[in-house]
């Protein structure tokens, strides 16, 4: 479940990044957060593949895995908030 959640978050932030870039309002915080979520998705996809090779189900749809996904999304959004805040403050001082 955490794999699917991080892929969805990565896709959402990637779409946001390209939409902002197209309109000329690119933000480093959005791009950095997208890369973080893609890194988490890649990490968990390797874990899912390793589990499948060992004979376990490809995706873990348990409640514990959903909680882990929520924690990862929350942590990513917290980092995004901090990056956005520092980007805004740094831009205001320039």
Image (cartoon, rainbow, N blue to C red):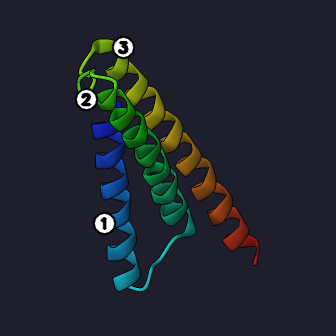
Which numbered circle lies on residue 59? 2
Distance CA(mark 3)–CA(mark 1): 28 Å
Which numbered circle lies on residue 64? 3
Nearer-N-terminus badge (2/3): 2
Residue identified by numbered label 1: 15
Q: Quadrant of the C terminus?
A: bottom right
Expressed as whole percent of the image width and height from the top left, the position of residue 61 reads 23, 21
Label 3 or label 1, whichever lies nearer to me, is 3
Is 22 displayed left or right of 93 in the figure? Answer: left
Along the line of sight, the residue nearer the viewer: 84 or 89: 84
Label 1 or label 2, whichever lies nearer to me, is 2
Residue furthest to the right in view is: 93
Expressed as whole percent of the image width and height from the top left, the position of residue 42 reads 43, 48
Mark 3, Cα crowd under 10 Å, few <14 / some 14-19 / many 20+, is few
Residue 1 appears in the figure: no
The count of marks equals 3
Q: Residue at x 62, y 49 (%)?
A: 82
């Amino acid at each position: 479940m955490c794999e699917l959640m991080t892929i969805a978050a990565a896709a959402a932030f990637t779409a946001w990044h390209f939409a902002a870039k197209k309109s000329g309002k690119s933000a480093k915080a959005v791009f950095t957060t997208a890369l973080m979520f893609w890194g988490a998705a890649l990490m968990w996809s390797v874990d899912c593949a390793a589990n499948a090779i060992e004979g376990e189900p490809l995706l873990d749809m348990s409640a514990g895995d959903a909680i882990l996904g929520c924690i990862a999304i929350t942590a990513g959004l917290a980092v995004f908030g901090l990056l956005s805040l520092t980007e805004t403050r740094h831009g205001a001082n320039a």
